[in-house]
Image (cartoon, rainbow, N blue to C red):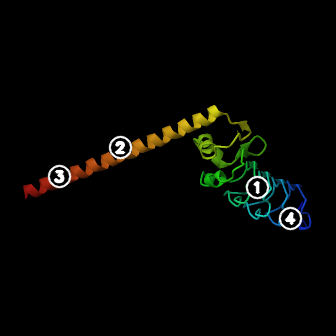
Amino acid sequence: NLTKIEGLHHLPHLRELLLHQNAISKIEGLDGCPRLRRLWLFANRLTRVENLHACGDLAELWLQENRISRVGGLDSLVHLQSLALAGNRIADYKDLQRLARLPCLVELSFADIHFGPCPVAQLDGYRDSVLCALRGLRQLDGLEVSDADRAAARDAYLAKVRARERGQREGRRQRTARRATRADRAKGDESEQ
């Protein structure tokens, strides 16, 4: 089992690197691989996505079944098309906007049949949120994304936003009414004295 990525600094034409099912705990040593297109690091011990800045041609990155809890370190991967993160510890939507900055991303997985789901994939409204944030996706969690799916996600998201806004308006209305009632009571108490 490999525990470290090393010895690749003299491989500028390397296109694929398959280091899955090892004990690698850090992405490193890839500075000498600027033409790398496919990197498989699934089933390792990674906790962060990092040190990929020299891999600007990377199109496929498989990081399933690691210990990753946040999605970051991908900003320089402008050619990334496929990102697999299933079976990690990603638990919320915070990082979706970071993924939205990847102009070529068309395939994404936070859940699949081999590695299971990340906690985020089990949240209510997960698919709708992802499809609204990442409009260029053609495949999510192994399932094709159609225009109808995207439209349904947008409609569901907008309905949720409108319901939240209605709830906020109702809450403000109720707070205003309570304040007015307290003010009326206070005036009544003053006039009785």
Q: Position of residue 59 (x, y in %)?
A: 79, 51
Inspect the image, locate mark 4, and give the three-letter code of the amino acid beneath it: Ile
Foreground mark, 1 or 2? Answer: 2
Q: Compared with residue 36, is residue 126 higher up or lower down, i.e. above or below?
A: above
**Rendering quarter of residue 5:** bottom right
The CA span between labels 4 and 3 is 72 Å
Q: Position of residue 118 (x, y in %)?
A: 68, 48
Foreground mark, 1 or 4? Answer: 4
Query: Relative to the observer, which residue lies in front, 57 or 127?
Result: 57
Q: In this orientation, does residue 91 appear?
A: no
Q: Earlier in the sequence, mark 2 or mark 4?
A: 4
Inspect the image, locate mark 1, and give the three-letter code of the amino acid beneath it: Asn
Query: Relative to the observer, which residue lies in front, 141 or 153?
Result: 153
Q: Position of residue 180 (x, y in %)?
A: 22, 50
Q: Which mark is residue 5?
A: 4
- The residue pinned by badge 3 equals 185
- The residue pinned by badge 2 equals 170
User: Are there few (<14), some (14-19), or many (20+) residues within 10 Å of tag 1?
Assistant: many
Q: Residue at x 86, y 62 (%)?
A: 33
